[in-house]
Image (cartoon, grey):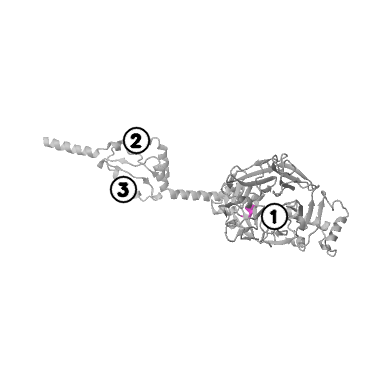
């Protein structure tokens, strides 16, 4: 009898041992049950998605636990069959801890979301593709273009990376025309000719004036080229001429170099490059002027047979000879002295000139974007200064040689197009204008040329039909250098009717740069000065609004980008402005 009781107690003890649960597992169960109430809503969302992450149900036999994730077959879980068999097997045994509804999550915090994303990545990609397809279906192309055309340039470049359709829509001629004619553009400054570690890297530094942010644009086409000139029109930049070293390619080395006559065109909107017809003569640092013309403009009729003649036309004392001579006797006398009377076809006719102007206005009203690019002066292959010039027609894609400047005019140092006239000034403080429509030079004699320090060459800019010049002069001492003298850069305006210069503004910074760059955009004059001081290259960007009565200068960029450039960048730099 006693032996039977002992054997019964032994079997009962074994049964209890088989049903016993470790303290660690019990503590984990209690912690999970407390968290169950906090994540009840998440569990319901998982049930809606078809995924159940409840597991770890305790069953009587063996005292173990069954761990499994109830995932549907539609999600591609290969453990689904194994989970179903384990679940059915577990339901046969008696439940020890609570009921079936009291299951708890065996995963730690954050693992559940990762597990769900891993098993449903394909489903998310499918839903994303469906969502995108629905967006394209319900958003027509014209509405999408109207949305994209209003984006800033940086956002537009990022939008092109979304898909091929957006990239195609934002690079069509129709889209570019909409953006060009819209009011969503902001001024951008493009700085060319940067030299880093002794090499012409070809990088273009672009400044978003509205956001004060610098961007770098790679330009492999400009690697190794320096001393070129740039001109901008519409939304493109033209890079003309330049040099490249023959012995040390990529370096600014003028001991053995090649002068180029090729012309490149860069479009920042599409980040594309293309070549146009090359110039007739190789030039480095040519003086450029660019202007829109009428669709019926003829370069051959205006400029052929004139490049080898030099006319003594001039405007003296603020009023031209023609304006004070109603019978045009002085003009006839100049023509009689200039060339034979047997060439009446070369005489400018007042009626034909008016007819050209009228047709020009009609063509411009129709939205014609034909333009001409003029390149004069510069240095030739042997570093000799050039007095010749040539003009490029965008319609025919050809360069045509134009009339040369007078012999005593001097070396050209600056030029700009204003009201259909290409104005240039020389180192000898002389001013001349090239009539683009009629194709000849006119010597302009102003009342008094602004005083300047001869080591600093003047710069010409034009804003809305107004001609300005920037020159450096001394404040005291009547041009004599002294201790109390201070050099300042002044802004002068030329009265095109009376040909008198008037000082309108003074630049706030000291003229530390021998080769500053100034460009204009509508009513704004942008300037950049770079110089090396204390072993570091500094850059200062300023702007002046000529429509303002005060015409004060302001700094627009406090983020100096020239600290990593070489000092030679101060001489090789050139700048262009675009409204993008």
Which residue is at 42% across, 41% downward? 45
Q: Furthest-bottom residue in view?
A: 342
User: Compared with residue 479, is residue 253 higher up or lower down, i.e. above or below?
Assistant: below
* Crowding near the residue tagged with mark 2, few <14, some 14–19, many ≥20 C-alpha atoms within 10 Å: few
Identify the residue position indicated by label 1 in the image.
287
Between 442 and 120, the residue placed more toward the observer is: 442
Instruction: Name the residue that disc number 3 marks.
Output: 85
Dominant secondary-structure state across the stretch colored magenta:
helix
Residue at image position (83%, 58%) is 349
N-term-proximal mark, 3 vs 1: 3
**SS for dot 1:** strand
Residue indicated by mark 2? 31
Query: How far apart are labels 3 and 1 at the CA level?
Result: 86 Å
Give the secondary structure at mark 2.
helix
Viewer-side label of 3, 2:
2
Confirm whether residue 547 shows in the render. Answer: no
């Amino acid at each position: 009898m006693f032996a039977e009781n002992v054997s019964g107690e032994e079997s009962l003890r074994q049964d209890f041992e088989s049903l016993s649960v470790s303290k660690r597992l019990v503590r984990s169960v209690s912690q999970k049950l407390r968290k169950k109430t906090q994540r009840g809503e998440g569990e319901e969302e998982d049930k809606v998605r078809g995924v159940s992450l409840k597991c770890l149900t305790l069953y009587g036999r063996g005292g173990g636990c069954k761990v499994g994730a109830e995932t549907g077959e539609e999600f591609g879980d290969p453990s689904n069959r194994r989970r179903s068999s384990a679940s059915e097997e577990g339901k046969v045994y008696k439940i020890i801890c609570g009921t079936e509804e009291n299951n708890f999550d065996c995963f730690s915090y954050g693992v559940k979301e990762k597990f769900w994303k891993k098993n449903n990545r394909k489903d998310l990609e499918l839903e994303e593709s469906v969502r995108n397809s629905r967006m394209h279906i319900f958003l027509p192309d014209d509405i999408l273009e109207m949305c994209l055309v209003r984006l800033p340039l940086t956002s537009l470049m990022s939008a092109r990376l979304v898909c091929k359709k957006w990239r195609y829509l934002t690079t069509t001629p129709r889209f570019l025309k909409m953006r060009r004619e819209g009011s969503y553009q902001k001024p951008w400054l493009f700085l060319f000719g940067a030299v880093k570690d002794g090499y012409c890297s070809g990088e273009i530094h672009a400044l978003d004036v509205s956001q004060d942010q610098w961007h770098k644009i790679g330009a492999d086409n400009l690697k190794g080229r320096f001393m070129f000139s740039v001109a901008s029109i519409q939304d493109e930049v033209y890079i003309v001429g330049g040099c490249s070293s023959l012995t040390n390619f990529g370096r600014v080395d003028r001991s053995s170099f090649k002068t180029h006559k090729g012309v490149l065109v860069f479009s920042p909107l599409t980040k594309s490059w293309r070549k146009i017809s090359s110039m007739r003569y190789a030039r480095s640092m040519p003086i450029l002027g660019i202007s829109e013309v009428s669709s019926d403009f003829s370069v051959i009729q205006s400029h052929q047979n004139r490049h080898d003649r030099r006319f003594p036309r001039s405007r003296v004392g603020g009023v031209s000879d023609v304006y004070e001579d109603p019978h045009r006797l002085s003009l006839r006398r100049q023509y009689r002295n200039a060339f034979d009377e047997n060439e009446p076809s070369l005489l400018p006719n007042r009626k034909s000139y008016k007819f050209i102007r009228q047709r020009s206005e009609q063509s411009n009203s129709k939205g014609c974007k034909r333009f001409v690019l003029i390149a004069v002066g510069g240095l030739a292959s042997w570093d000799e200064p050039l007095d010749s010039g040539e003009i490029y027609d965008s319609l025919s894609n050809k360069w045509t040689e134009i009339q040369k400047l007078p012999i005593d005019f001097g070396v050209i140092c600056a030029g700009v197009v204003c009201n259909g006239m290409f104005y240039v000034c020389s180192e000898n403080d002389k001013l001349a204008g090239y009539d683009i429509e009629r194709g000849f030079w006119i010597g302009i004699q102003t009342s008094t040329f602004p005083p300047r320090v001869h080591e600093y060459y003047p710069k010409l800019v034009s804003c809305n039909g107004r001609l300005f010049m920037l020159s450096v002069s001394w404040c005291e001492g009547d041009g004599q250098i002294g201790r109390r003298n201070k050099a300042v850069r002044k802004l002068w305006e030329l009265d095109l009717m009376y040909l008198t210069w008037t000082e309108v503004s003074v630049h706030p910074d000291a003229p530390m740069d021998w080769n500053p760059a100034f460009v204009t955009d509508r009513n704004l004059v942008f300037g950049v000065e770079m110089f090396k001081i204390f072993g570091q290259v500094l850059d200062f960007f300023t702007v002046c609004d000529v429509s303002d009565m005060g015409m004060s200068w302001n700094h627009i960029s406090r983020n100096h980008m020239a600290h990593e450039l070489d000092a030679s960048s101060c001489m090789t730099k050139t700048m262009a402005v675009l409204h993008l």
